[in-house]
Image (cartoon, rainbow, N blue to C red):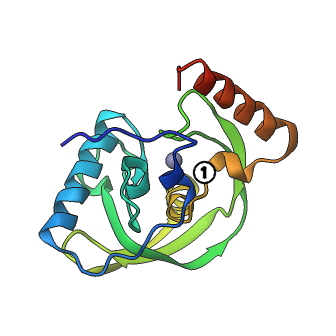
Amino acid sequence: MLRPILKYGDRILHDRAQRVEAVTPEIERLVDDMVETMYAAPGVGLAAPQIGVPLRIFVVDISIGRDPAGLLVLINPEFVERDGLQLEEEGCLSVPGFNATVMRPSRAVVKGLDRAGNEHRHDATGLLARAFQHEMDHLDGTLFVDRLRGIKRDLIVRRIKKLTRAGKW
Ligand SMILES: [Zn+2]
């Protein structure tokens, strides 16, 4: 089932999400909805808080459905290692219409449970490492806008406030 994607300013997006206690059929259905919503957007990643569920789950597919092996589901993910540095343009389905360059480690090793409840470890570089870190941020209530500083951040926040006041956000 397609779920509406919350936008910057919605409380759930700015709060820390809770751990999943058990991978139940409800969680499996939630994951299916997240995958469907991510592909429909389309996006390379989606975290549960983005559809209003404050749980530590995200889905990522940097091939956006072109590679069947590209879909990764992470439940209760944790960083194992991070190193290096990359500086790339980033956007977010919860901040439509805005992009900014965000500094991130270039490599990230993340472990978490899959849809069946089995633990996996993913060693990622480049775009996948960036996607992992962007989605992990969502689970801690952080959006890419929060990682910007100064004028760039103020400009985006001001424009979002203006759009919100105009009823266009
Ligand atoms: Zn995002």
Q: Nearer the viewer, residue 111 or 41?
A: 41
Q: Is residue 124 above or below residue 49?
A: below
Label 1 residue SS: loop
**Residue 119 horizontal/vertical position (percent):** 31, 81
- Residue 31 at least partly seen: yes
Examine the rendering and report whether any part of residue 87 can be seen: no
Q: How many marks?
A: 1
Instruction: Report if the beta carbon of the residue with label 1 is closer than 8 angstroms to ligand 1.
Output: yes
Q: Residue at x 39, y 40 (%)?
A: 5
**Is the residue marked by circle 1 packed among few (<14), some (14-19), or many (20+) residues within 10 Å?**
many
* Residue at x 57%, y 26% (from the top left corner): 97
Relative to 65, 144 lies left or right: right
Residue 98 screen position, x and y as percent: 62, 31
Taking 38 as reference, is 132 above or below it? below
Q: Position of residue 168 (x, y in %)?
A: 53, 20
Seen from the viewer's position, the closer of residues 119 and 76 is 76
Q: Quadrant of residue 160?
A: top right
Q: Is residue 45 left or right of residue 167?
A: left
Residue 147 position (above or below residue 54) = above
Q: Residue furthest left?
A: 25
Q: Position of residue 156 (x, y in %)?
A: 71, 33
User: Which residue is drawn at the image coordinates 41% and 68% (left, top)?
Assistant: 56
Report the residue at 48% width, 74% height from top. Answer: 110
Amino acid type shown at disc 1: Leu
* Residue topped by disc 1: 143
**Quadrant the N terminus occupies:** top left
